[in-house]
Structures are given as C-alpha cells and as structure tokens.
Amino acid sequence: MFVGHYAAALAGKAIAPKAPLWTYVGAAQLIDIGWSSLVMAGVEKVRFDPDLPGSPLILDHMPWTHSLPAAIAWSLAGLMLARWLLKLPWWTALAVGLVVFSHWATDWLVHRPDLEIWPGGQKVGLGLWNLPGAEKTLEMGLIALTAGCWLWNRGRFGRTAWPALLFLLYLVTLQMIGELSAPTGDAFAFARLGLSVYLVTIAVAWLADRGQNRDEA
Ligand SMILES: [Zn+2]
C-alpha cells in the first residue's frame, strides 16, 4: 500500500473540507514519515527480498511507528497538531486524526503479519500483498472512489476540477514509477527516497488545493 493511503486523505477532504488537502495528505502518511525518519536513524529496520510477491519489504522491527499503540499515539498527535497548531475545528481535527489512523488500518489489510498489537507482542496483517493483482485493484479502486467524492464536493463549492485531476494524475504516475522501480537493498537510501516522496506529495497537494478553504463548511 503506497498511493492507496492517499484515498483516506481524499475521503477526509470530502467529508471535512475545512482542513486543506495538504494536511490530510501529510496525515495519511504521517506514520510512514515517522517510519522513514526512524529507518534513516537506524532505530527501525527494513530488509528486502525481491522474490516476495506484491512488495519486497521485510519489516522486522517498527515498534515506534507501526505497532497498534504507536499508531494510536501518532493519530492523537495528528489530532492535537490539527487542533492547536492549525486551529482547525474539533470535528475537522478528529477527521485528521482518523486519517492518520487509516494508515495502520490499510497497512493491516496488505502487510504480511508485521504489525505488532503491542510492542514485542503478536504481529498481524492480512497479507493482501500475496495477491498482487487484488492488492493493486483495491488500491486504485479506493483512490477512484474517494477522488469521485472529493471532485463532487469541489463541484458543490463551485471549484474547478482540473487541479484535483492533476493531483490524481500525479498519484497515478507515482504508482506507476513505484511499480517499475525495485529497491536497491540499501535501507537508508530507500527510506530517504520515501521521505522525499511524502514531502513532495504534501507540496503538490498544497499547490492543487490553494486558497478557498474558509468558505467550505
Ligand atoms: Zn506504513
């Protein structure tokens, strides 16, 4: 699950549009922003096996970002930041927190069991990565569905569709590049690339959704 995480961002934007899109896009990958930073710092670990179906990632150790209690803590942090730093209403801040948590829920669908229910405890994951066709269909289906809701909502506020369509084109391009490129086996370089993509995507979302949030209810 990579681009599919952004489906939750588009859903959040459609349901609680007072937060700018970049906030939701950052929220959807907040846990992986933490993960790539901690992998670069050597605190969390990733290895690669190109023979695995769906994704080459072997995620042995990520208690600070992808255990259930950690995901809840990151979600609460997202909620607080949205409320107190961005001064968003409680309902919208709650939506931001839920989008942060959606990352863990969608990872649970696709990861092979590597998500700890508690640090050091049982690991869970439905392993949809083992069925790459179904996993890709789910990912792109979620994006298409939530993008439809978001575009419909933009229409209600008299906003043009094209910046949203460009953002979608960007996501589809990201997905295709992701499909074609295999990690080199260098965990630090992989995490650094991931972190850059997450940050660039936040900037692209900001560009695609500038202004006009105040009049949206
Ligand atoms: Zn993740």
Image: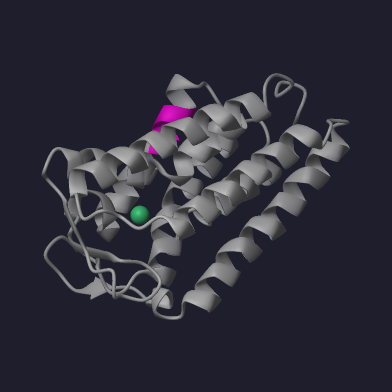
Identity of the residue drawn at 77% across and 23% down: 215
> Residue drawn at (30%, 75%), measured in percent from left and top?
52
- Depth order, front residue of 169/97: 169
Q: Is residue 131 left or right of residue 206?
A: left
Q: Position of residue 56 (x, y in %)?
A: 30, 66
Viewport quadrant of the N terminus: bottom left
Q: Quadrant of residue 76?
A: top left
Is 194 left or right of 160, judged from the image as shown? left
- The answer to whether residue 208 of the structure is visible from this angle is yes
| Position of residue 74 in the picture relative to residue 121 (left or right) | right
Where 144 falls versus 187 (above or below)?
A: below
The span picked out in magenta is 78-82
Task: State the residue at coordinates (88%, 31%).
Answer: 158
The answer to which quarter of the image holds residue 163 is top right
Q: Is residue 179 above or below residue 200?
A: below
112 and 196: which one is in front? 196
